[in-house]
Amino acid sequence: MLSYRHSFHAGNFADVLKHIVLIKILEHLRIKDKAFCCIDTHAGAGKYELDSEYAQKNKEFQNGVGALWQLDNLPGAVADYVRVIKSFNATDTLNTYPGSPLIIKQLLRQQDHLFAHELHPTEIELLNLAIKNDRRITVQHTDGLKNTLGLLPPKANRGLVLIDPSYEIKSDYETVVEYLFKFYKRFSHGTFALWYPVVDRSRNIQLENAIKSSPLKNVQLYELGLKADTTEHGMTASGMIVINPPWTLATELQDTLPYLANTLGLENAGHYRIETLVAE
């Protein structure tokens, strides 16, 4: 299905958590001079204008990056995230939100590389415009999950695979786990970051159980919720499942997630999870 457009959701609470985790992983990879490779399986348009018709429809960014934009005394990881987003805005007004490929681009060094995949015919055109022929980045109009198999292990032999599907199709919950196992088999020491929404908690339980019973090792889960689970339509929480995370990540998010749950949660119902799904 190719109906999903991230423009409706850019900068929302789910993006806040996802991009904080992404930035922390990239910062860790940058510590060593050796090159690294990033693979973004669902790159999207790359850049989103928050005054667009899409973003203004539900104004989800207002309870995401917008709620953090002018705050002081932010926890370290949140401050780093806001600083990155501000670098894409020429003034103090929040107008532009970068998607994951532009955040990765911002943190790439000359020796590093990004493979950005996008299947949507409109999004791929916008992504190419956003990337602007950067030699460090290969944009591919193809199925990111299928194509990533052929890219592993990367030549640099270190790096990150970001898996961020829309979950429009219910089978995506099973498909991403199947591909994650295949990726891990080819690149077991790489870092993998899988984003997930919480719309129907039973599907998330199945996903987590599949990972727990798999050959994967060193798997952590980080989740941020705005309100309690519900059977009504809509996303109440989202999270990141990270395989081979930086050793500092859990400690950094111990301060970050309670702050975000308190700041972004609705009617004092914000909540979070930090769990080890599979030990090292």
Image (cartoon, rainbow, N blue to C red):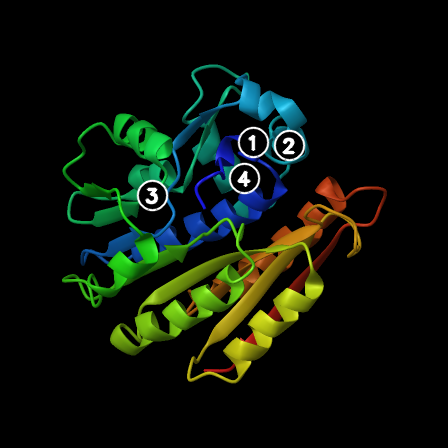
Residue at the spot x=79%, y=55% of the render?
Answer: 231
Q: Which mark is residue 60?
A: 2
Q: Which of marks 4 and 1 is in front?
A: 1
| Kind of residue at badge 4 | Ala
Q: Which of marks 1 and 3 is in front?
A: 3
Q: Nearer the viewer, mark 2 or mark 4?
A: 2
Sequence-wise first label, 4 or 1: 1
Sequence-wise first label, 4 or 3: 4
In depth, the one of 135 and 229 nearer the eye is: 229
Q: Is residue 76 visible?
A: no
Query: Mark 2 and mark 3: span between their CA atoms?
Result: 24 Å
Are dots 1 and 3 in contact, CB under 8 Å? Answer: no
Q: Is residue 55 visible?
A: yes
Q: Which mark is residue 79?
A: 4
Query: Mark 4 and mark 1: span between their CA atoms?
Result: 24 Å
Percent across and percent down for residue 62 are 66, 28
Residue at the spot x=47%, y=64% of the render?
Answer: 248
Sequence-wise first label, 1 or 3: 1
Are dots 2 and 1 in contact, CB under 8 Å? Answer: yes
